[in-house]
Every structure is written in structure tokens, then in C-alpha cells.
Image (cartoon, helix red, strand yellow):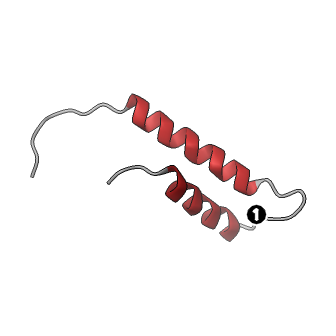
Amino acid sequence: MALNKESLKVRLEVELQAQGFEMSGEFAMAAKMAEAIANAVVDEITQNAEVSGTKVS
């Protein structure tokens, strides 16, 4: 399964909204925070991932 920044951002937004964060409005920053976290997580994993072994089942 490939990592996807947009998919992770949407999941983060859903979870933040479920916890009571405001996703829209003049001062809402949760959507920007979700995007920043998604970008950082995907970049970190794709740049620093190590694969061990070669067995495929």
C-alpha cells in the first residue's frame, strides 16, 4: 500500500473534526495543520524507510 499525502490529510482532518477542532472559518487552522502533518509524515517515511529481506509471500 502506497503512502498518499492527500489521503492522510483527509484522515487527519476527519479525526481532528471528531475531536472538536474547527476545520473552517476565519481563524480555523486545523486543516492547515492536518496538511502539514501529512506532508511531514509521508516525506519522513518515504525518505528514511529501510526495507529488510526480499521474501515476498
Q: Nearer the viewer, residue 32 or 14?
A: 32
Seen in the image, is 43 located left or right of residue 37? left
Q: Quadrant of residue 49?
A: top left
Frontmost residue, 6 versus 18: 6
Q: Vertical placement of 20 versus 4: above or below?
A: below
Q: Quick check: 25 above or below 52? A: below
- Amino acid carrying mark 1 in the image: Phe
The percent position of residue 40, horizontal first and vertical second, equals 56, 39
On screen, residue 31 versus residue 24, left or right, reads left
Residue receiving disc 1: 21
Residue at point 35%, 51% (across, down): 2
Q: Where's residue 13, x and y in %?
A: 64, 62
Residue lying at 46% horizontally and 51% vertically, measured from the top left: 4
Residue 55 in percent (x, y) is at 9, 42
Q: The N terminus lies in which quarter of the figure?
A: bottom left
Neighbour class for label 1 at 10 Å: few (<14), some, many (≥20)?
Answer: some
Q: Residue at x 72, y 50 (%)?
A: 32
